[in-house]
Amino acid sequence: MRNFDFSTLPRVNTSANICSAEIRSLPDYFQVNEVLPFEPDGSGGHVWLNIQKQNINTDWLANELAKFAGVPSVAIGYAGLKDRHAITSQWFSINLEGHQEPDWAKFENDEIQIIKITRHAKKLKRGVLAGNKFKLRLTNVQGEQSLWESSFKHIQQQGVPNYFAEQRFGHQGNNLNRVDYWFSTGKAPRKRNQKSIYLSAARSWLFNLVLAERVQLKNWNQPLAGDVMLLAGTKSSSFVVNDVDDVLQTRLNTMDIHPTGPLWGRGTQLVHSDSLTIEQRVLTDWQDWQQGLEKAGLNQERRSLRLFADDFNWQYIDNSQIELEFFLPAGCYATAVMRELAIITDVHRRNYHDAQVITQDNNNNSE
């Protein structure tokens, strides 16, 4: 039985095991604002709406927009999914070519507010995103302030391991269990969307395993012979390290480049030497997953092993509350930052789990 416990992945910051706090004790204590890589040009057949929402998931809102505008669901575009149990803002595009524009004010309610309306010539596609701005309130903060200060400065100066967070893997890692069943039996899920979710989870978990090993070896943020380095601020500008010299080390120390780990798929591995040895050792027992990802048609990619939270700031509200603000690039997780600060309890997830247990107990008692 394979272990898919995200909480066991190693941390870098030792103080994170001493301090503790809670997040999402209230919806407005977890705010996420989407940032586009460009500004809509203000004209064209697609209306773009920046919408703030709470207690609503992205797919549901997209379907409601289609109904309200009288267009098919395929006419709606958005860059990515946002958490339901938070206050989030994100962009949606609606193709209104051949349709009259509705009164968007009538779409608003207590949980949906339209922040901005503009136009653009093209649909907003998935993944077209610079990143997200986070504003988080930590509550029930425990631990010496000096330890928290040390952790904040560590994150500012060293960054954090760029783990894919547990929400990538479904409730209690169920997506990974389903992947394991798929790749071991050959019985693929029927729905295309499910396949995509499971394949993404599989690649992410293999990446996490390689990153975890390099954290253990204390070289997750250091160059190794054979590493593939990624230029900061990009997803594809990379080069292979043959020899580690002072110039390379300086570029890495100044956050100009980052070591990478594998997003598995078809194609030739670019890493060699020390880096290849580590990746092969870690993934030896996961060859069925590697083969499954290749068979599914995914191609080899690389992802940075370290993550920097830009514009990272903190403020003490009182002795038990701290407010954090920072920006993360697209595809990176606030959870990866939080776990390097302290032992974090997600109040919403805890309450959901407790409710499930109570429901199960009641069902058992009624039998």
Image (cartoon, helix red, strand yellow):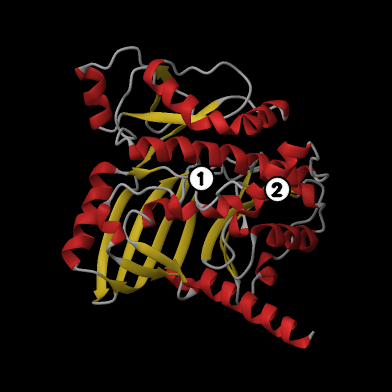
Measured along the vertical axis of the image, is residue 302 above or below residue 182? above
- N-terminal of the two: label 2 or label 1? 1
Kindly identify which numbered label has been placed on residue 21. Answer: none
Q: Tag 2: Cα neighbours inside 10 Å, few (<14), some, or many (≥20)? A: some
Instruction: State the residue lying farthest toward the bottom.
Output: 366
Measured along the vertical axis of the image, is residue 314 above or below residue 294? below
How far apart marks 2 and 1 lie (CA) works out to 33 Å
Disc 1 residue type (three-letter):
Leu
Residue bearing the label numbered 1: 36
- Whether the residues at callouts 2 and 1 have beta carbons within 8 Å, the answer is no
Q: What element carries label 2?
A: helix
Closer-to-camera residue (117/315): 315
Dot in front, 2 or 1 = 2
- Give the x, y percent position of residue 59: 70, 57
Q: What element carries label 1?
A: loop
- Give the x, y percent position of residue 335: 44, 55
Residue bearing the label numbered 2: 178
Quarter placement of the C terminus:
bottom right
